[in-house]
Image: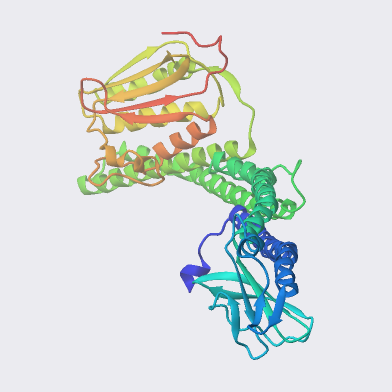
Amino acid sequence: MSDVAGAPTSIRRRLLLFLISSLVLMVAGAAAVTYWVALRSANDAYDRSLLDPALDIAENLRFDAAGAHVDLPQKALEALVYDQVDRVVFQVRTPTNEIIDGVPDLPPPPELGPGQQAFFDRINGGEKVRVVAHQTANGYVVQVGETLHKRNRLVGEILVAELVPASLIAIVAIALAWLGIGRGLRPLENLRTELMLRAPRDLHPLSEDAVPVEIAPLIRAFNGLLAQVRDASTMQQRFLANAAHQLRTPLAGLQMHLELLMRRELASDVRGEVERMHGATVRASRLANQLLALAKAESAADHGQELERIDLRTIAGAAAREWAPRAHALDIDLGFSLDRAEILGDPLLLPELVDNLLDNALRYTPTGGTVTVGTGCRDDVPFLCVEDTGPGIPVAERGKVLERFYRMPGTPGDGSGLGLAIVQEVVARHKGQIEIDFPKGQRGTRFCVRFPNASPSAALSP
């Protein structure tokens, strides 16, 4: 029962089934009525012609010493019951129901009065026949029967003449209904397409322009739900940003005091504890900064802030000056291959993207390795790529590493699992695409972010 109750239904299918079944019932009803009218018309037309030979035979009944008989030559009698299409037979019975002429296998007629006629159907020679019985004034009964070929052909012609146009009208009506239902359901199709093309974090209300009155309440209810979700998301982002912002100051102060403490002469066991506290504080500070950056990226996406024309080469060049000292301290060769790549971007979020990609690359690249940052345009598509010679990311894990707080099992280092999630948020904000693969000819990881082009004239091949 639950499976049947939960089965999906289609408005189009239900409307078409109702319409088609209604038209089929109408055509079937029309066919039944037409058949009844055609049969009545055929019987009325041919019964009158069937009665004429019965009356002629009754008028030529003679009574003499030899008894009652039909006083007609055989040729005349044959001509009287001749028909090109049907087989015609006759029979004459006495008042005592004895057969005196004609075929012997016509059944007796129903009770009649003098001068009365009756039309009925009987079986003769294994074939259905239409019979007329006429009783004379002296009680003799003349029966004439004929097969139904002419009648059936007339009924068939009437049925074809009536039902073929009706069937064509029904087919045209179904085709028009199919098109009309499709046009009527087009607003629902457009609504479904709009929802499927939306980004997961796009909580802007749906447009109510040109919405049919039947689904306008649904749109308003859905927009109300989106407003509630948007308010809840805003409150969450505000709480996250405030919490992270409030944590930064005490964590920075704690880190500074620990660094001052580490400059003093300390016992070896105390120094070890202080160093572990300092490392935990650094990690907590970085986590707070990342949470703040994540909240900022989500807020920018939700509020639709204006984008500016930015050259990715400038963003990457600024990152070079900031990250070069750390790369030198880790004995990692940090290289840059920067070409012009103009996009419409957020000047506050793009540095976060580059910083998190570089931090991730430097964190997992071993000593003596290389990290390369590249910008440019390929086939008029601006890109920013960061390559490293670290352990690499398996294909099965590439979608998961972009999730929040996810770290691959067995991964070294002290990352929080938020860096690549921030990258994903920034890429989604700019409607870009991020690809993760192996660098050509070496092991490691290559993150390449492709952005929409700012304008056709802005793209320059490297």
Tell me: residue 34, above or below residue 447: below
Residue displayed at 58% across by 56% down: 10
In-front residue for pair 377/271: 377
Position above or below: 73 against 398: below
Q: Quarter holding the C terminus?
A: top left
Q: How far across and how far down the image is residue 196, in percent? A: 55, 42
Image quarter of residue 134? bottom right
Residue 443 image position (x, y, % from top left)? 21, 27
Seen in the image, is 398 located left or right of residue 340?
A: left
Q: Is residue 357 above or below residue 226?
A: above
Please state which of residues 406 and 452 is positioned toward the viewer in this rendering.
Answer: 452
Residue 66, percent across and down? 63, 83
Query: Is residue 291 toward the left or the right of residue 117 in the image?
Result: left
Quarter of image, res 102 = bottom right
Percent coordinates x, y for residue 246 in the rendering: 54, 46
Identify the residue at horizontal 26%, vertical 43% (top origin): 266
Instruction: Please state if 197 lies on the left or on the right of 263 as rendered.
Output: right
Between 377 and 74, the residue placed more toward the observer is 74
Can the viewer see residue 223 in this picture?
Answer: no
Decide if residue 336 is in sight here.
yes
